[in-house]
Image (tube, rainbow, N blue to C red):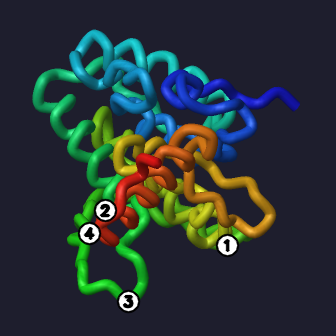
Amino acid sequence: MTTARWPASARYEAPESSAPGGLGFVQDLLNTASLGKPRQPDLLESADAARQWLHASAAVLHRIDPGAPAMPDGLDPGGLRHVVSFRDDLRALLSPGPAEGTAETVAVPSIGTTAAVTLGPGGARLSAQGDDVEALRSYALVQLVAASYGGTLRRLKVCANPRCRGAFYDRSKNCSRVWHDVTTCGNTQNVRAYRARLKERGLSSAP
């Protein structure tokens, strides 16, 4: 079985780190942001860049899920702002929260959209509704709900490194991965934490 190559996520992740099915589209939307080292371009920075990403990502999506709604061919300035805001809200929802026991609080955005519920012999089915930007938002949220009920949503994560925040799908057996790339994000954060501890003790890392 050939793993789909989502255009935005492929800039940062190996194919085996792609989320399954339509959840891969949500991951790809998250990874349109400027991430990585060196930084990759934001694929929603302009209408032309967004059009190219939508075309490429929708082509992958409809091979995986022929029943997915049509995605917009392009975005006007207002639509582009809505998609960028939606992407950023999703990242906030999926980002790791503060460490347990801390006093810090995180405001979680409320993302509203519409979807249809149909009942049949196989049970209830949730499907995306709307056109253009609303279809994109609705489909993404339907995938998140389906993943939640299927027990796979916990595997779609945002890197714990605040300088990365790349979206990845954790396929580890115990779902314990926290870094987008342990050799870069993980090591960078560990060194930064070590230096912070030395500073707190009034020590220097120099010999």
Question: What is the total number of numbered labels drawn onto the structure image?
Answer: 4
Distance, label 3 to label 2, CA atoms, is 23 Å
> Do the residues under discs 3 and 4 have CB atoms within 8 angstroms?
no
- What residue is disc 2 on? 199
Q: Residue at x 61, y 72 (%)?
A: 149
- What residue is disc 4 on? 108
Residue 115, horizontal then vertical, whole percent: 40, 58
Sequence-first tag of 2 and 1: 1
Q: Residue at x 57, y 69 (%)?
A: 148
Looking at the image, residue 41 lies above or below residue 142 = above
Q: Which mark is residue 101?
A: 3
Distance, label 1 to label 4, CA atoms, is 31 Å
The residue furthest left is 78
Give the side of residue 164 with respect to residue 17, left or right: left
Residue 62, horizontal then vertical, whole percent: 60, 29
Give the side of residue 128 with respect to residue 173, left or right: left
Q: Which mark is residue 123?
A: 1
Looking at the image, residue 178 lies above or below residue 76 = below
| Mark 3: amino acid | Gly
Task: For marks 1 and 4, give the one nearer the viewer.
Answer: 4
Sequence-first tag of 4 and 2: 4
Say what secondary structure mark 3 lies in: loop
| Mark 1: amino acid | Gly
